[in-house]
Image (cartoon, helix red, strand yellow):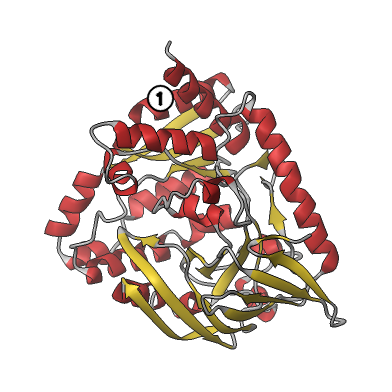
Amino acid sequence: MNNFEERLNEYAKLTVKVGINLQKGQPLAINAPTEALEFVRLIAKNAYEAGASEVHVNWNDEVLTKLKYENSPMEVFENFPKWYVDGLEDYAKKGAGFISISAQDPELLKDIDPKKIAASNKSSSLALKEWRNYTMNDIIPWCVISIPTKSWAKRVFPDAKGDEAVEKLWNSIFSATRMDQKDPVKAWENHMSNLKEKVEFLNEKEFDILHYTSSNGTDLKVKLPEGHIWAGGGAVDSKGVNFAPNMPTEEVFTMPLKTGVNGVVYSTKPLNYGGNLIDEFKLVFKDGKVEDFDAKVGKETLKDLLDIDEGAKYLGEVALVPYDSPISNSNIVFLNTLFDENASCHFAFGKAYPTNIKGGENMSDEELEAHGVNNSLTHVDFMVGAKDTSIVGITKAGEEIQVFKDGNWAI
């Protein structure tokens, strides 16, 4: 076995043991591109060795996806297949772990009718609402990871020749996921412990407002709801098992008060949404709602995102990530939210995680709404952190504490 094959197997093992933390007798469901075949086989091997009762894989393929968008009529995209939803919900009810391999050409659907893409995003969001309750409430363990594909690697490293782009992207992914450490599992344990220290500080302070400013024009005040909870450094499922939802992860996060966001914010990295890029955009908020927006690239796509439902026009997540972090320091724009959101402070359009407010996982939609928690069919992260980002936390007593200075933690 060569060195790369050994690292690949260790990466699969890390995904099973730390990412999903698979338990004996637990089923595992994987969503993966066809290019990930060898890696998925290694995940399955490690999962069975850990005691998995079953490993099921849902495959997707970029060529087939594009052919479908080019040739299928609109009604196909307006009606998400029930058999697919039933399968996911069945595994969720069995307590399965879910691994999703995020690796798409960021410009795959660049020339596709945007109305088809918008219809597909809306129908899938509606159909998968119940399944997403299992993941967004951490009822079951879930983990998003990535591997390079040729098309994606070429977008990230357009000047690389032959297989060089894929090799460079592999090295970047290994570095971002701490696979370049002597003991990756131990490195992850230490990293998650460090994130939890930040979480404990923020939960202790119980900030009322976070005030964001940077030289690009961002000037935004974000009010946090009563009883909000900061999280990061892993999660705990309904059976008390620790898992890491995102690999890599550099964030600590909570929810905003739905109607408590005011001011303007500018994006700092491209957003890959449904096979299209949105870049250099600004959002103007009043009482939580996006009341004006603009984008130099992908404005129509941004409009479609905001029009999915009323909740898509409000924020559901506030996440803090230092500018001086491994992914940011690589100076690579991955054009993949899993990585780019972990290089930058970010927000998310749409649904909030109910676990980010006290007792939220046991509240009905109506109770969550009464507590100022945003609900939506979508949840899309976008990056706003800059090298001079300042974030001042303001307590209910009016005390001001510098949380971020020059893009990094000040605490």
Q: Mark 1 points at which residue?
A: 41
Classify 194 as above or below 365.
Answer: above
**Camera-side residue: 10 or 388?**
388
Can residue 241 be seen here? The reply is: no
Classify 95 as above or below 408.
Answer: above
**Camera-side residue: 401 or 261?**
401
**Camera-side residue: 315 or 175?**
175
Q: Is residue 215 left or right of residue 172?
A: right
x%, y% of residue 159? 27, 43
Image quarter (top left, top right, bottom left or bottom right) of the C terminus: bottom right
x%, y% of residue 26? 58, 32
Can residue 80 be seen here? The reply is: yes
Classify 4 as above or below 356.
Answer: above
**Camera-side residue: 344 or 204?**
344
Classify 60 as above or below 219.
Answer: above
Q: What element carries label 1?
A: helix
- For this orientation, the residue located farthest to the top is 1
Residue at figure coordinates x 25%, y 46% from the top left: 62
Q: Residues within 10 Å of mark 1 (few under 14, many from 20)?
A: some
Q: Find residue 169 and report its image quarter.
A: top left
Q: Find residue 178 and report its image quarter.
A: top right
The amino acid type found where label 1 is placed reads Arg
x%, y% of residue 337? 45, 55
Residue at figure coordinates x 36%, y 76% from the top left: 295
Residue at figure coordinates x 45%, y 78% from the top left: 282
Residue at figure coordinates x 46%, y 66% from the top left: 378
